[in-house]
DNA sequence: ATAATATGGTGAT
DNA sequence: TCACCCTATTATC
């Protein structure tokens, strides 16, 4: 689940449930006992997402969470079930509790550390202050394949393997194209699609890139097997041709050779 | 019951 | 480029 849309959705929900309130915190797993003790009884000032990073400002501390591939938050209206022993962190507000399992990162840091971390991120299409020109400049500055550059969070923050495949398909660009060769108009479309589809992802809680004009149903009603154009598919949702699976940046990238003809030069 | 897999990222080589 | 870390779900014996 966790590409940028999931993280922004969590930030939105957790902000609504916890900001302005004093929270209870504990670490049933025990691996975050010290942090939970500091958070327990503290007041949440803000919850924000930057790319795939979640940042909670709690009193004078900063809680930094990165879900990685396996991390999950589950949430309940109180009363919540007793946390299983693998829950790294449970946060309880006035009427909600969330439980975090399997995160790659769950740490308390200070403002300097979080500023340094966030300073290494490229622009996040979901944040209003983000500057697409920065991402374009970064893309033009490397000869790595565009399919590799799009997963680099220092280039553009928030995309994962699903959005990479889907956005390149929509742009008609083969993932092996050298990043520096990406035409500006293709980038502009890619950025606009990224912002639009990440927003859809936040709203629906899942990635849906198949337009209603193609499927005949609203994205919110798209069935399990009909949410993606190429990702996870054997045949292209648009042309029906066989989907290729080149490995780029160490991960399988789904792509349609027919619909994505802007090829390696 | 066990294995393979997954939407991520780091650090060593 | 590879090994490795974290967990849950699905597929396969």
Image (cartoon, coloured by chain):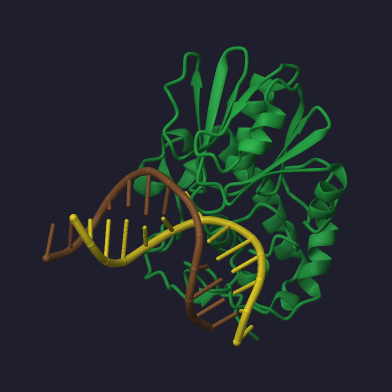
Chain colours: A green, B yellow, C brown
* In-front residue for pair A29/A132: A29
Q: Is residue A263 above or below residue A159?
A: below
- All told, the count of numbered labels is 0
Please state if A22 lies on the left or on the right of A172 as rendered: right
Residue at figure coordinates x 58%, y 52% from the top left: A104
* In-front residue for pair A126/A181: A126
Residue at figure coordinates x 70%, y 60% from the top left: A153
Residue at figure coordinates x 38%, y 60% from the top left: A233
Residue at figure coordinates x 48%, y 50% from the top left: A70
Find the residue positioned furthest to the right: A112
Q: Name the quadrant containing residue A143.
A: bottom right
Residue A250, position in %: x, y? 53, 74
Residue A260, position in %: x, y? 54, 70
Q: Name the quadrant containing residue A245.
A: bottom left
Q: Is residue A69 above or below residue A221?
A: below
Q: Quadrant of the C terminus of chain A?
A: bottom right
Residue C4, position in %: x, y? 49, 68
Residue A111, position in %: x, y? 85, 43
Q: Is residue A215 above or below residue A79?
A: below
Please state if A181 lies on the left or on the right of C11 as rendered: right
Q: Is residue A171 above or below residue A2?
A: below
Please state if A242 lies on the left or on the right of A78 as rendered: left
């Amino acid at each position: 689940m966790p590409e940028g849309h999931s993280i922004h959705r969590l930030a939105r929900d957790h902000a609504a449930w916890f900001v302005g309130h004093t929270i209870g915190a504990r670490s049933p797993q025990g691996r975050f006992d010290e942090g939970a003790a500091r958070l327990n009884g503290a007041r949440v000032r803000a919850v924000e997402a930057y790319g795939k990073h979640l940042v909670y400002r709690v009193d004078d501390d900063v809680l930094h969470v990165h879900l990685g591939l396996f991390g999950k938050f589950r949430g309940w209206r109180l009363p919540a079930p007793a946390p299983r022993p693998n829950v790294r962190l449970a946060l309880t507000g006035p009427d909600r509790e969330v439980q975090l399992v399997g995160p790659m990162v769950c740490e308390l840091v200070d403002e300097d550390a979080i500023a340094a971390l966030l300073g290494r991120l490229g622009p996040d299409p979901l944040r209003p202050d983000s500057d697409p020109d920065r991402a374009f400049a970064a893309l033009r500055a490397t000869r790595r394949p565009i399919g590799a550059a799009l997963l680099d969070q220092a280039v553009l923050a928030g995309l994962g393997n699903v959005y990479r495949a889907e956005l390149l398909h929509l742009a008609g660009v083969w993932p092996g194209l050298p990043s520096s060769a990406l035409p500006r108009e293709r980038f502009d479309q890619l950025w606009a699609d990224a912002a639009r589809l990440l927003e859809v992802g936040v709203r629906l809680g899942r990635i849906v890139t198949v337009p209603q004009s193609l499927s005949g149903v609203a994205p919110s009603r798209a069935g399990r097997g009909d949410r993606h154009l190429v990702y996870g598919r054997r045949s292209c949702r648009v042309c029906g041709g066989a989907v290729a699976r080149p490995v780029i940046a160490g991960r399988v990238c789904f792509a349609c050779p027919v619909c994505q003809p802007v090829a390696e030069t």
